[in-house]
Each structure stands twice: as structure tokens, then as C-alpha cells.
Image: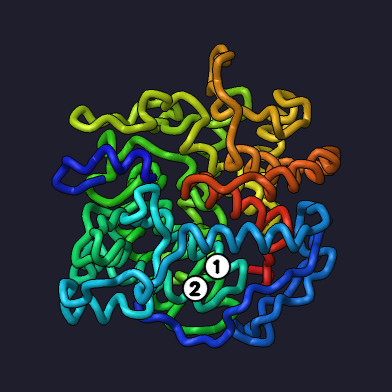
Amino acid sequence: MKRFLLSLMGLSVALFMACSSDDSAPVVPQQGGGEPTPGGDPTPGGDSGSSQAPDVSNDTYYTTLPAANQAALQALYAAWVQKFYVTAEEEIKAPDELGDAKLAALTGSARIKFDEPLNTVSEGIGYGMLITYFMKDWDKFDRIFKYYRAYPVSAASGYYFMKWKVSGDKYNGGFVLGAQGGSATDADLDVVTALLLAYAEKGSPEYLDYALKVANSIYMTEINATTSLLMPGNSGGHMADGYCYNISYFSLVGLRLLAKYDTEHSAKWNEVLAASLAYMKKVQDASYGLWPDWSDANGNPISPENSNNPSSTSALYDYFGLESVRIPLRLIWDYSWFGDETTKAMASKAAQYIYGQTSGDIMNVLSRYKYAGEQATTVSLGGAHFKGVFCALWTVNPDYANSVNTCRDVVLNASIKNYFETSLQLLSSLYLNGYFVKHFNY
């Protein structure tokens, strides 16, 4: 989202209380694979609410994962924390500038540094909450959650999602008085997903309460009433009169969890889920097997460009690129947990295309792919984010197991770079190494 939202800074609308826990150490999950069997739905916060990962049997997942490389995963997580995670206590140097209310809201919080290290985007907060949730690093999870709560778009108006960007200063880093713009839907859904997963495991009503507040904000302002598709943001995020979509924002797992836990709006969330799956399939079916970064109501590529501030991704809107790169991980996560046949078909088609393009060698993955038409021959090789999501996608097909075993370590051992690439590298590695643990049969 950051790549598009940075283009909207000239518009009028551009486009946490920490939950108590003394469980802060990351844990090592058990491995799973193969076809799942029906299971129960334990009370949230029951036996699975401890700091230890549950005993996940071999029939938990629809995909088959390689053996985990725990040491490398833990090292990658530590490197991510060191470079991108910072607490209020470490960073705030001039607390008087914040005022008592803002200082209270930020004390005990933490943020994820953006590419401009003084700044923070809600997208990074969403990634941070998912990462720390799967690592079972509860102290960091709660601190990042508190930061998200400190910058609501307008809680007084019932809009509890975080403003998409906080512009920091040299005294207080990303912990400042104000923030700008409206929301970013992908971030909002990632935060809701992390909170609902944490609630299911820990049982804290604080997680559920705020997740439902953000969910209601999404429900009111980020869903197109005609198509039932998610728009990129509220207000100024309604590009092309609300008919410009970014499929990488469609968090299928998040929508399934909302249908379960947001009982007041369950029917609507199921409607959005069905519309999202149908739209994703329609767009993919018109291509080699991938999706464009931006598309219109008919599924055709469309530029999100704003005439005053062109988007950094608008020129390549008809490529699978820096926006769409998130889609494979969202797909494989959903299929791995829920076994949806439509999700499986889409993941299989995309995996087969990339496998053929690379001859099963993740080192041959490119940094973008033409949605339709002739593929450019001058495209550079893809970074750890492109390698990671496609390596994860290949777990849909057991025939690709040898390639997955190889690319898992390629992704794990790649040097960390900017915040976006490293976030997807780590999320993909968490999945590939068995940290996307499904505690309950949601």
C-alpha cells in the first residue's frame, strides 16, 4: 500500500493499550502436512493459550511443508527485529512535545520502521503484528498493537483503523503528535487477522473488542456496495469511484475469521469472501496465471495514477509486481488452512506458471511478470520477497517438493534489505518453516 499511498500526500485525504502478558519468547512449532481431518473448536484462551506451540498433528494442513530450519529462521527474525523494530522508550527523546495524552497512548508501544526510518506506515504495523504473533513474541505483539491504536483515523466517528502514515521527527522518531491520511485496507485486515488469531489463542477480550471495532470501520467504508469487493482505503482510497482494486489486499484468511467472529456481519463477510474469490479467479483466468497490480470492476488492468502525484506503481499497473507479489502468500495460507478448492485451483495455476518460467529454480524468479501480452526480457531478477512468496506457493503441489526444499534455504539466507522486501521474506519463511500454526479448526 505504501507505494501507492505515497502518491496521495497532496490530497486532502491521502490516500493501544498493550494487553498484559508475560509470554514473550518466540517458540518453535511442530510440523504438519497432508490432508486434514475435521476437528473441534476449543474455547479461545483454553489449553492452547499457553506460550508453547500446540502439538500439531500431521493431518493439520492441506499443504506439505519441508523440514524446518529453526536456527536460520530465528536468526532472520532477530535481524528483522534489530533493523526495523523500535520501542517508544528507545526512541522518544522529547516527550514534552507529544503532550500528556499522546505520551500516555504511546508509552509501552513499538513501531516498525519504514524505508524512511523516521516514518511508519500501517502496512508495516500489520506485518509486524502477524510476524510477532506467529513467533509468539507477545510483548512485541502487544507493543505494536498499542502503536496501531494510538493513531486512529477518527475514533470519534467510529473509524478505528490506523491512519496509513505517521511522519516522524528527529527527536521522537515515528512517535509523533499527528499522522496523515485515511486508512490502508490491507493493513487493517492484517491487523484484524492478527488480533483474531491472538484472541483465539489467548482469550483476551481486548483483542476481540478492538478487532471488531476495526472490522466495523472496514464494513462501513472499505467495501464497494455494488461489487462487494474491498477498496484500497476509506475516503481518498476510493480510486476510480471505488472501482479500482488491488487484489493483494484481499486477505482470504482474514475474511474467513471475520465471518466467524464478527457475528453481526457474518453474512456480509461471507459475501465479500465469495466475491473476492470469484473476482480473483476471473482476473487470473484472463492471464498466464498471475494478476495485475491494479484492476477495474471488469477485471482489466487499470492505472491508479493520480494526476497530481503519480503512484510509484502506476506505470507498471498491468504487471504482476510490487503490489501483486503479496497474493501468492495470501492464497497458499488460505489453502493450507481451509482447503478451499477455488483457492487451490488458483494457487496451482500460478505455481505451475512460475515453475515453468523458472524451470523450478527459484533463483530465476523475476522482479515482475507481464499480466498479459509479451513478457519483457530486460526485467531484473526478483528479490527475497518474490523468491519467498513463490517458494511458499510451490507447496501446493507435492511434485515441487525438491524445489521447495532448496528455495526454503535460499529465502532464509538472503540478506535483509528494505522493510517491504524483508517483511515478505520473513512472512514467507515463517510459513515455509511451519510457524503458520493453525490452533483451531476455525
Lateral position of residue 231 relative to residue 306, left or right: right
Decide if residue 207 is on the left or right side of residue 278: left
State the mark number for residue 386.
none
Bin the neighbour count of mark 2 within 10 Å (Cα to Cα): few under 14, some 14-19, many 20 and up: many
Q: Is residue 239 visible?
A: yes
Nearest the viewer among 49 and 391 is 391
Tell me residue 256's x, y (percent). 55, 60
- Look at the picture and state if 214 lies above or below 200: above
Residue displayed at 30% across by 67% down: 160
| Residue at 61% across, 73% down | 136
Give the spatial CA distance, label 2 vs label 1: 6 Å
Could you tell me which residue is drawn at 36 percent across and 66 percent down?
A: 214
- Considering only order in the chain, which callout, 1 or 2, is on the residue closer to the N terminus? 1
Q: Which mark is residue 140?
A: 2
Name the spot of residue 88 as percent of width and height, x first. 35, 73
Question: The disc labelled 1 sits on which kind of residue?
Answer: Thr
